[in-house]
RNA sequence: GGCGCCGUACCCAAGUGGUAAGGGAGCAGUCUGCAAAACUGCGAUGCGGCGGUUCGAACCCGCCCGGCGCCUCCA
């Protein structure tokens, strides 16, 4: 049974959905004013995997992930560029789909936008005012934190503690410094919507309450997002939602850790920032291969902890995948093999146990590595073609949960020459033109290999080695088998 | 000042009270004309430090050291 670490209780708990076999989950998406970076990718991927695993486990999942498309940063960006907010949000929503698509992150069931939920937002705000939890001041509406006793429950903070460190709030319209805006009156030129308090726009937190309630109901199962959203965003969401409905909001709060560079959180000011598209652009590998490398890398650490992004980490992920695809390649090579009893059930079970354990993907990957070793051993003894296919299918099934192993071995790029760097390392090796791979056909390779085999038969090892070296330099790896034939990969 | 996270071999990284998974690198071997791959073996008597609880602790408690995050927009 799946267990999840619940930020609300600070404990790992058995996951029990409200409705049997159905899961409703909401994840905070991105504010669309810029390209997504690898940290956004991690968050999106964690919940993509959670969704996949829930589905693998037999649940019907309703997954809602929003786009924040009204926000100060968007307005600022639009003004800087002299374009409309819609132009900015449209552009970066498209970019989001493109970048996340390359990472194999699927669309959510619903992907609502704040601007399309003004009615719900206004209604929710009115409800909070009528319950005495919010107040309007000169076109703004604020949530009054002192009226909500459970404030701080999620982030484990007390109002007094917050006050101590809070910066001087210049907004003296608030009754308490921690009161937060539900509705902001708009300045001329800013996007605005009509409301009982005059034209304005919603505060940041209210949209998620409005959209999650609208699409999932007042109480739902899982709410997720990055660690940094715990306070104030999610704390405020809870206050608004529970305050308005009087009901429990989300039951399990799941938060992912940060991607760091050199043990520090990525940030633009430190210049240690990597956008997803930048990584793909710099990658020497094809899109699908790069996408899978990134997925493997992002899943190699438990989602709750920090994860250091580096060139070396990416290389290790690549190497690990090389090993798997090498096995998959071998599983397609059919020889007359005798049957030996073998079992994969043990590791399949191990995989599930790992995933049940708060989505322990590093352990799950370890199980797959062990299975890989076990099958390689089995292959040494021999495995009939039918069994090989069976094994490959199981890898495909389990891999699907993580979004791995879906390529054909010939789509994989084994070439281990590092021609460009992706992460923090600055060295740049001489690049082998990527075009080389394109014009060298399989037939070219086969004919070279035939020539080499002839040379080997003649014991002309000088010639044989020269051919191998030539192919190596073109990114083709040659492996001689005991029977005198060779296998190749690139 | 408040809240929270982290510290496991050369590197990455599981472990959540029962005697240290997995991967990479390295070394040694099997195989091989050589190479590569695959496979085999080696590698922390110890899990930042010091105490405590326990029959038993990397795991629980306390203190200390070191690193990080949040409290302001942030995945």
Image: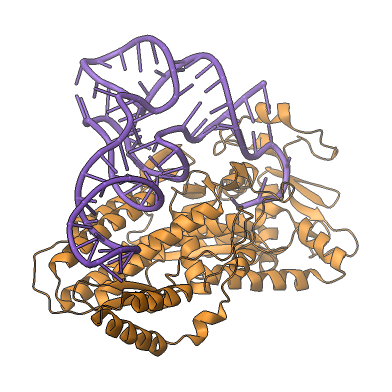
Q: Colour of chain B?
A: purple
Q: How many marks?
A: 0
**Residue, x 59% and y 56% (percent of image)?**
A423
Q: Is residue A408 above or below residue A79?
A: below
Measuring 39% from the left and 63% from the top, which residue is drawn there?
A321
State the residue in front, A21 or A335: A335
Q: Tell me the quarter of the picture where residue A392 sits.
A: bottom left
Examine the rendering and report whether any part of residue A223 can be seen. Answer: yes
Residue placed at 21% from the left, 59% from the top? A374
Quarter residue B15 falls in: top left
State the image coordinates of residue A444 (x, y, percent, origin top left): 41, 88
**Which color is chain A depicted in?**
orange
Residue A78 shown left or right of residue A424 in the figure: right
In-image side of A359 versus A309 (left or right): left
Q: How is the image coloured?
A: by chain
Is A47 in front, or is A58?
A47
Quarter placement of the C terminus of chain A: bottom left
Q: Hey, which residue is sitting farthest right in the picture? A: A188
Question: With respect to residue A285, does A15 lie above or below?
Answer: above
Pinpoint residue A143: horizontal percent, then vertical percent: 70, 44
Using the image as rendered, state which of residue A469 and residue A79 is in the foreground: A469
Q: Does the rendering let one see residue A104?
A: no
Q: Is residue A120 left or right of residue A488?
A: right
Q: Position of residue B7 (x, y in %)?
A: 46, 32
Residue A384 falls in image quadrant: bottom left
* Residue A305, position as x, y percentages in the image: 49, 43
């Amino acid at each position: 049974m799946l267990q999840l670490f619940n930020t609300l209780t600070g404990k790992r708990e058995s996951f029990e959905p409200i409705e049997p076999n159905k899961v409703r989950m909401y994840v905070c998406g991105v504010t669309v004013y810029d390209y997504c970076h690898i940290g956004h990718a991690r968050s999106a991927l964690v919940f993509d995997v959670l969704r996949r695993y829930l589905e693998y486990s037999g649940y019907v999942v309703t997954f809602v992930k929003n786009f924040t498309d009204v926000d100060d940063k968007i307005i600022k960006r639009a003004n800087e560029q002299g374009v409309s907010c819609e132009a900015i949000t449209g552009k970066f929503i498209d970019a989001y789909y493109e970048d996340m698509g390359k990472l194999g992150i699927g669309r959510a069931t619903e992907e609502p936008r704040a601007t399309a939920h003004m009615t719900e937002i206004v209604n929710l705000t009115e409800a909070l005012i009528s319950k005495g939890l919010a107040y309007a001041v000169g076109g703004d509406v604020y949530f009054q934190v002192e009226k909500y006793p459970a404030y701080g429950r999620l982030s484990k903070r007390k109002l007094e503690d917050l006050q101590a460190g809070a910066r001087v709030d210049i907004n003296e319209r608030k009754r308490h410094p921690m009161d937060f805006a539900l509705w902001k009156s708009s300045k001329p030129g800013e996007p605005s919507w009509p409301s009982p308090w005059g034209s304005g726009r919603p505060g940041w937190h209210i949209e998620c309450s409005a959209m999650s309630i609208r699409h999932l109901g007042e109480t739902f199962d899982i709410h997720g997002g990055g660690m940094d959203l715990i306070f104030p965003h999610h704390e405020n969401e809870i206050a608004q939602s529970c305050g308005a409905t009087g009901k429990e909001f989300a039951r399990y709060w799941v938060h992912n850790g940060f991607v760091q560079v050199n043990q520090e959180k990525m940030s633009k000011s430190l210049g240690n920032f990597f956008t997803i598209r930048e990584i793909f652009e710099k990658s020497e590998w094809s899109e699908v291969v790069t996408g899978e490398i990134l997925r493997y890398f992002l899943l190699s650490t438990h989602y709750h902890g920090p994860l250091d992004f580096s060139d070396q980490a990416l290389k290790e992920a690549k190497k690990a995948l090389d090993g798997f695809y090498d096995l998959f390649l071998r599983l397609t090579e059919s020889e007359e093999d005798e049957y030996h009893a073998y079992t994969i059930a043990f590791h399949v079970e191990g995989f599930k146990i790992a995933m049940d354990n708060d989505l322990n993907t590093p352990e799950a990957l370890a199980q797959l590595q062990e299975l890989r070793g076990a099958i390689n051993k089995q292959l040494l003894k021999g495995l009939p073609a039918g069994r090989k296919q069976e094994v490959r299918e199981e890898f495909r099934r389990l891999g699907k949960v993580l979004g791995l192993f879906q390529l054909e071995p010939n789509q994989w790029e084994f070439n281990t020459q590092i021609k460009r760097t992706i992460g923090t390392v600055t060295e740049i090796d001489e690049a082998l033109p990527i075009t080389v791979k394109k014009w060298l056909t399989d037939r070219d390779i086969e004919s070279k290999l035939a020539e080499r085999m002839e040379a080997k038969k003649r014991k002309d090892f000088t010639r044989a080695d020269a051919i191998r070296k030539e192919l190596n330099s073109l990114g083709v790896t040659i492996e001689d088998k005991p029977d005198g034939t060779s296998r190749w990969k690139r």
